[in-house]
Image (tube, rainbow, N blue to C red):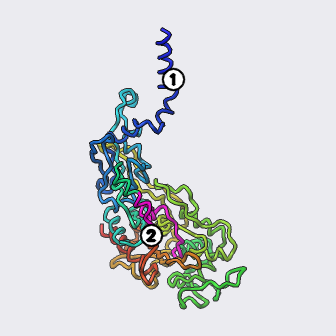
């Protein structure tokens, strides 16, 4: 009797009090075996872009990817060795069937240890738009983020160079070798440049500066002279803020002329005249300084300094100094202008479903910030249209469409010795339409081998192809 009692006590201790410790013990493979005991749910972009294949081994099923490099920035990877990232990681419980929302009879499933089939994640990605983004980037190092301004739905999320998540999905020697090769690659193909990398935005940030100047009354007429001096010596220094074109080297420029020509001296001066606090507030309206911007994959924090002297503010107002942004946030800038100042929260997922298609959760559009009113937005759209029709953004023109954009060529590195970052942000809608444009896009080419590295030459044609894919739907 004593032995029976001792056995019962020991069994209780192990099964109840040591349960958590044993469940998470690295030597306990039960959870891993169960995870791969059935096919994983799918990630869907129009149609499933993932699958599962039987391995015949202890881990019964392995993740597969359709057009893996095309969608890698969206899906992330699910590996039997290296875990899960991005959507594969955020929705791992749903995809593996362990999400409580998938159960029919929770108590019965707990008693029988019945595992539900994995659910599906339906993304907002448009395959044609995604393909246009990846083809446009080609072999260059860069990224594209395309957003539907009215809803915040992400239509394309591309990062190059890319990689095949299927190459590291298993647990074999080939998967480990592929992983080591990817980790050693200096081009960092596993880095999601659209969400997780920040770059100085250069002159594309002038849209934010113009928005702050208009919203705060620094500029009341985009055709009137701004009063910006030339040359403009930054406050507290003897340093002149130089322009990239001699067409800017004069006084009496209007905001319209300054944006079309991309004049550093005028926009830097306007940033200082508007003031630090209004500039910070406007940048935050578009997602800058937000360390918890989830889509639901978390984006890197875009930066606009909140403490600066006037000369630093002048540089920051033209997208230099410490100003840095993800392509996602710069797409939010273009989308906010397109949507009458309503900056929608970007969303990469449309809905979650059970394996049979029954809806588990529907993601609804959500307002991120009301950055400014429709009047300011209309003026900003005029400025951006002039950039495309009469200025540096001519390569983004689309026949039969109204296109507004802003180029940017951002210097970086010691003494600006690095290859410049070529930027373009834009929105487009059918000519004559007064509806909210169906697409806003941000493109950055980060390491081109071209001899003429400018946003208008390298990034604008990519943006054009992406917007054209949306307009052709």
Q: Is residue 199 visible?
A: yes
Q: Residue at x 56, y 88 (%)?
A: 248
| Real-space Cα separation, disc 1 to disc 2, in angstroms | 58 Å
Do the residues under discs 1 and 2 have CB atoms within 8 angstroms? no
Q: Residue furthest top?
A: 1
Give the x, y percent position of residue 133: 36, 68
Quarter-of-image position of residue 394 = bottom left
The numbered mark, 1 or 2, whose residue comes first in the sequence reads 1
Give the x, y percent position of residue 443: 44, 71
Is residue 454 highlighted in magenta? no
Q: Nearer the viewer, residue 266 or 117?
A: 117
Q: Is residue 467 visible?
A: no
Relative to 453, does residue 302 appear above or below in the rendering? above
Give the x, y percent position of residue 355: 31, 43
Residue, disc 2: 442
Q: Residue at x 32, y 47 (%)?
A: 62
Relative to 203, does residue 338 appear above or below in the rendering? above
How many marks the image carries: the answer is 2
Disc 2 packing (10 Å; few <14; some 14–19; many ≥20): many
Q: Nearer the viewer, residue 238 or 394?
A: 238
Query: Please, what secondary structure does the residue beneath circle 2 have?
Result: strand
Write the start and end of the magenta stretch as one range.
180-204
Is residue 203 highlighted in magenta? yes
Relative to 410, does residue 194 appear above or below in the rendering? above
Q: Residue at x 37, y 45 (%)?
A: 95
Residue, disc 1: 13
Give the x, y percent position of residue 294: 49, 55
Q: Nearer the viewer, residue 382 or 95?
A: 95
Q: Is residue 12 left or right of residue 238?
A: left
Q: Residue at x 33, y 79 (%)?
A: 399
Q: Nearer the viewer, mark 1 or mark 2?
A: 1
Query: Please, what secondary structure does the residue beneath circle 1 have?
Result: helix
């Amino acid at each position: 009797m004593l032995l029976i009692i001792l056995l019962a006590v020991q069994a209780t201790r192990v099964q109840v009090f040591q349960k958590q410790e044993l469940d998470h013990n690295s030597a306990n493979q039960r959870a891993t075996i169960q995870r791969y005991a059935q096919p994983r749910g799918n990630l869907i972009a129009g149609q499933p872009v993932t699958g599962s294949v039987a391995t015949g081994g202890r881990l019964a099923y392995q993740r597969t990817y359709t057009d893996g490099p095309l969608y890698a920035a969206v899906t992330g990877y699910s590996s039997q060795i290296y875990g899960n990232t991005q959507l594969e990681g955020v929705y791992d419980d749903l995809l593996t069937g362990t999400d409580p929302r998938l159960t029919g009879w929770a108590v019965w499933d707990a008693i029988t240890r019945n595992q539900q089939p994995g659910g599906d994640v339906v993304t907002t990605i448009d395959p044609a738009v995604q393909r246009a983004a990846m083809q446009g980037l080609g072999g260059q190092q860069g990224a594209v983020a395309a957003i539907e301004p009215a809803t915040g739905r992400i239509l394309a999320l591309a990062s190059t160079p890319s990689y095949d998540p299927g190459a590291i999905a298993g647990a074999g020697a080939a998967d480990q070798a592929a992983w080591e090769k990817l980790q050693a690659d200096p081009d960092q193909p596993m880095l999601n440049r659209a969400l997780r990398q920040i770059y100085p935005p250069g002159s594309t940030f002038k849209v934010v500066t113009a928005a702050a100047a208009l919203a705060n009354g620094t500029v009341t007429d985009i055709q009137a002279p701004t009063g910006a001096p030339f040359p403009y010596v930054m406050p507290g220094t003897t340093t002149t803020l130089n322009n990239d074109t001699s067409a800017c080297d004069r006084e009496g420029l209007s905001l319209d002329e300054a944006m079309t020509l991309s004049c550093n001296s005028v926009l830097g001066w306007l940033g200082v005249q508007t003031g630090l606090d209004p500039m910070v507030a406007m940048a935050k309206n578009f997602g800058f300084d937000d360390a918890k911007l989830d889509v639901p994959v978390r984006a890197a924090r875009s930066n606009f300094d909140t403490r600066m002297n006037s000369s630093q503010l002048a540089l920051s107002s033209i997208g230099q100094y410490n100003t840095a942004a993800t392509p996602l946030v710069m797409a939010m800038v273009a989308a906010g202008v397109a949507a009458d100042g309503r900056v929608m929260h970007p969303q990469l997922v449309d809905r979650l479903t059970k394996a049979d298609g029954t809806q588990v959760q529907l993601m609804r559009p959500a307002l991120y910030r009301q950055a400014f009113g429709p009047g300011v937005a209309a003026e900003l759209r005029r400025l951006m249209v002039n950039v495309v029709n009469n200025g540096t953004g001519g390569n983004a023109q689309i026949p039969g469409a109204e296109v507004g954009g802003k180029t940017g060529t951002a210097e970086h590195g010691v003494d600006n010795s690095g290859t410049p970052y070529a930027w373009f942000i834009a929105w487009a809608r059918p000519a004559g339409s007064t509806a909210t444009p169906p697409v806003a896009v941000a493109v950055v080419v980060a390491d081109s081998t071209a001899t003429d590295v400018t946003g208008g030459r390298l990034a604008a044609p990519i943006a054009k192809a992406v917007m054209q894919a949306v307009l052709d739907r």
